[in-house]
Image (tube, grey):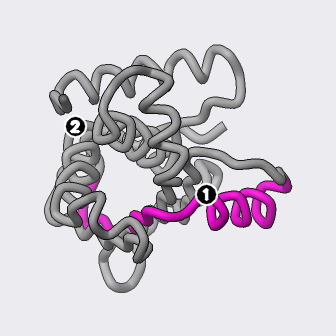
Amino acid sequence: MAQPLACVIIIAVEINVLIEEEFKDCLETGWLRSLAEQVLTLQGAGVEAELGLVIASQERVRELNRSYRGKDAPTDVLAFSTLPSVEEPFILPSDGQLHLGEVIVSYPQAVIQAGEEGHSIKKEIATLITHGVLHLLGFEDETPELKKQMQAREQEILSRLRID
């Protein structure tokens, strides 16, 4: 099991945001970038960190879920980490940036879940991005205990972000 990254001094963070065309008017790139950066900051991760953030359709996320996880079902967020496992030595890439990976959020699923939870779409997007970034940093939720730990950390971060 990978240990989550923590207590790394932030020097610079690069957040690359891609919003599929049909959702461009629904969310602001700057807000998404700021949100992901704040999650990294609150988690104490960084160095020269870079990650991708994609807001996508339900179909795109389902296709990725099927292709990479073998699950032919819709999901709300996927995280594809490029960090080495704990067993591998930690060495920064030659460009000096720690490439964390990508977080892909299904905007339609976020809308559905926001309605079910009775809160704003922005709060749901923030929850999903926080969840995805924590996965990139090594958090797991495959067992009830790990899920409980991850949810507790998500709630700590979200309460500090004060979304809504």
Counting from the top left corner in percent of width and height, residue 12 is at 16, 66
Question: Between residues 120 and 152, which one lies in front from this camera angle?
Answer: 120
* Residue at the image position 83 percent from the left and 53 percent from the top: 72
Counting from the top left corner in percent of width and height, residue 109 is at 54, 45
The correct choice, above or below, for 58 with respect to 96 in the image is above
Q: Amino acid at mark 2?
A: Leu
Task: Determine which residue is flagged by label 1.
Answer: 58
Counting from the top left corner in percent of width and height, residue 139 is at 52, 37
Of marks 1 and 2, the one in the foreground = 1
- Measure how far apart labels 1 and 2 are at the Cα level: 29 Å
* Residue at the image position 30 percent from the left and 65 percent from the top: 49
Answer few, some or many: residues within 10 Å of disc 1's Cα (few below 14, many 20 plus, some between 14 and 19).
some
**From the viewer's perspective, is 81 left or right of 62?**
left
Q: Amino acid at mark 1?
A: Gln
Is residue 48 magenta-colored? yes
The quarter of the picture where residue 140 lies is top right
* Range shown magenta: 46-70
Of marks 1 and 2, which one's residue comes earlier in the chain? 2
The quarter of the picture where residue 67 lies is bottom right
Answer few, some or many: residues within 10 Å of disc 2's Cα (few below 14, many 20 plus, some between 14 and 19).
some
Task: Determine which residue is flagged by label 2.
Answer: 42
Quarter of the image containing the N terminus? top right
